């Protein structure tokens, strides 16, 4: 019995660890926005904020373009083969980051020049790498979400397993901001960072992911029955005919949109406040310098925001008697209130607190959306993952509004709108119609 339990646990652990890597590198990509704004885009003129947020835009564009492709791979090749393909895309994306850093360091004056804007070729290569990294994350999530939700692990519910996996993912997102600040840029002030500092840490990341890929290739990951159509099997219903799923896709579009916008742009807002003489403080201190290294309030804001995900998901994994619908209703309502307070007071710590509430929303929306889909599940996961493109749309939209308004302050209205639309899904859109519960 013990051996059987261990054999059931190991695949779950492997998939969860790979999801940790996805979370870590997703946030590394976001946290590189500020350093690249001060290095690659120092001469970007009136489009500086818009171009900076293009890093996140291209990352999540990978979800939109390749999410459904990944679900086809799952149906044709299975979960293990698909996750390995995702890891290979990850290596390709990191390699583009490496090349970008080399070009930016050795040929800083090569680029596109128009009006008051100069875009280095190194930056263009970087956003191509960002697209590949987003593709990797999309492919892996298409595997992880249905795998974890459907995997039989004694004494657990689907929403619990998703919360456990996403909690481990949050360890990656929580540690990434300080990895960028302390490891990649050695704790120097944001004004003094050099693009050449990326070369060694990115090289080590490439090597690490390569090792994980080789290990995964040689491990046993069992397939999950009744979660994907057989190769060549025709599915008789359109996915969009399931109303709770279709509205769930819309809900996740807005969820990821505001989740990523806060994590990616909160530090840019913090820099703006510092430039206008109103710097953010932490227990009365506007600088965090330890051992001569500047940890940065901006990094702390992002770390605590993503840290809220880890704490919230860890706690919610014990919520065996609270439904996903109830959790989503409460968290979206409170998040909208916090965003409004943050705008009125210009206190970004209220936005940081939203991370705790955002922590369970993915698991809630996903589990509500795929309920009853059976063999449509893997295909649904690909479409669902494509909706993560919201992270690109809202991050870029907010950056553009910041350039138009001349400030980030009121751009957080986007967050309020997103939270209210998710609240609508929790209260009404997630309810399953009788005709969508037939034996499919």
Image (cartoon, helix red, strand yellow):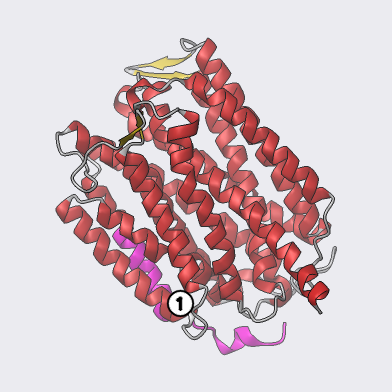
Most foreground residue, 267 or 227: 267
Residue ID at (25%, 50%): 348
Task: Place residue 68 in its image quadrant.
Answer: bottom right
Residue ID at (73%, 45%): 212
Most foreground residue, 415 or 28: 28
Residue indicated by mark 1: 429
Tag 1's secondary structure?
A: helix
Span shown in magenta: 415-440
| Residue 91 vertical placement versus 225 (above, below) | above
Q: Position of residue 430 (x, y in %)?
A: 49, 78
Q: Position of residue 320 (x, y in %)?
A: 52, 83
Image quarter in which the C terminus is found: bottom right
| Residue 418 vertical placement versus 296 (above, below) | below
| Residue 373 vertical placement versus 285 (above, below) | below
Mark 1, residues whose alpha carbon is within 10 Å: few (<14), some, or many (≥20)? many
Image quarter in which the N terminus is found: bottom right
* Residue projecting furthest to the bottom: 434
């Amino acid at each position: 019995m013990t051996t059987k339990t261990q054999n059931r646990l190991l695949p779950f652990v492997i998939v969860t660890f790979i999801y940790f890597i996805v979370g870590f590198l997703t946030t590394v990509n976001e946290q590189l926005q500020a350093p690249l704004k001060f290095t690659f885009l120092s001469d970007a003129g009136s489009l500086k904020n818009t171009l900076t947020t293009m890093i996140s835009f291209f990352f999540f564009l990978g979800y939109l373009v390749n999410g459904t492709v990944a679900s086809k791979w799952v149906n044709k090749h299975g979960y293990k083969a698909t996750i390995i393909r995702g890891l290979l895309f990850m290596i390709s994306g990191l390699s583009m980051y490496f090349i970008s850093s080399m070009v930016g360091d050795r040929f800083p004056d090569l680029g596109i020049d128009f009006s008051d804007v100069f875009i280095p070729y190194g930056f263009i290569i970087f956003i191509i790498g960002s697209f590949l990294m987003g593709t990797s994350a999309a492919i892996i999530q298409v595997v992880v979400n249905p795998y974890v939700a459907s995997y039989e692990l004694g004494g657990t519910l689907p929403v619990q397993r998703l919360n456990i996996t996403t909690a481990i993912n949050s360890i990656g997102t929580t540690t990434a901001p300080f990895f960028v600040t302390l490891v990649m840029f050695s704790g120097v002030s944001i004004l003094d960072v050099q693009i050449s500092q990326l070369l060694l840490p990115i090289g080590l990341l490439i090597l690490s992911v390569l090792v994980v890929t080789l290990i995964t290739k040689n491990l046993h990951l069992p397939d999950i029955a009744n979660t994907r159509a057989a190769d060549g099997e025709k599915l008789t219903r359109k996915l969009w005919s399931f109303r709770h799923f279709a509205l769930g896709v819309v809900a996740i579009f807005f969820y990821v949109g505001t989740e990523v916008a806060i994590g990616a742009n909160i530090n840019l807002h913090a820099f703006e406040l510092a430039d206008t003489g109103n710097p953010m403080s932490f227990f009365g201190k506007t600088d965090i310098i330890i051992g001569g290294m500047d940890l940065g309030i901006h990094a702390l804001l992002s770390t605590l925001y993503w840290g809220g995900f880890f704490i919230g998901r860890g706690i919610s994994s014990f919520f065996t008697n609270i439904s996903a619908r109830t959790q989503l209703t409460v968290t979206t309502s409170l998040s909208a209130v916090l965003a409004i307070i943050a705008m009125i007071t210009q206190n970004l710590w209220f936005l940081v607190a939203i991370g705790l509430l955002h922590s369970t929303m993915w698991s809630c929306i996903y589990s509500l959306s795929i309920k009853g889909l059976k063999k449509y599940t893997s295909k649904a996961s690909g479409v669902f993952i494509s909706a993560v493109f919201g992270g690109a749309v809202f991050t870029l939209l907010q950056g553009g509004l910041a350039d138009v308004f001349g400030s980030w302050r009121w751009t957080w209205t986007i967050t309020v709108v997103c939270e209210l639309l998710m609240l609508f899904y929790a209260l009404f859109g997630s309810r399953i119609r009788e005709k969508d519960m037939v034996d499919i």
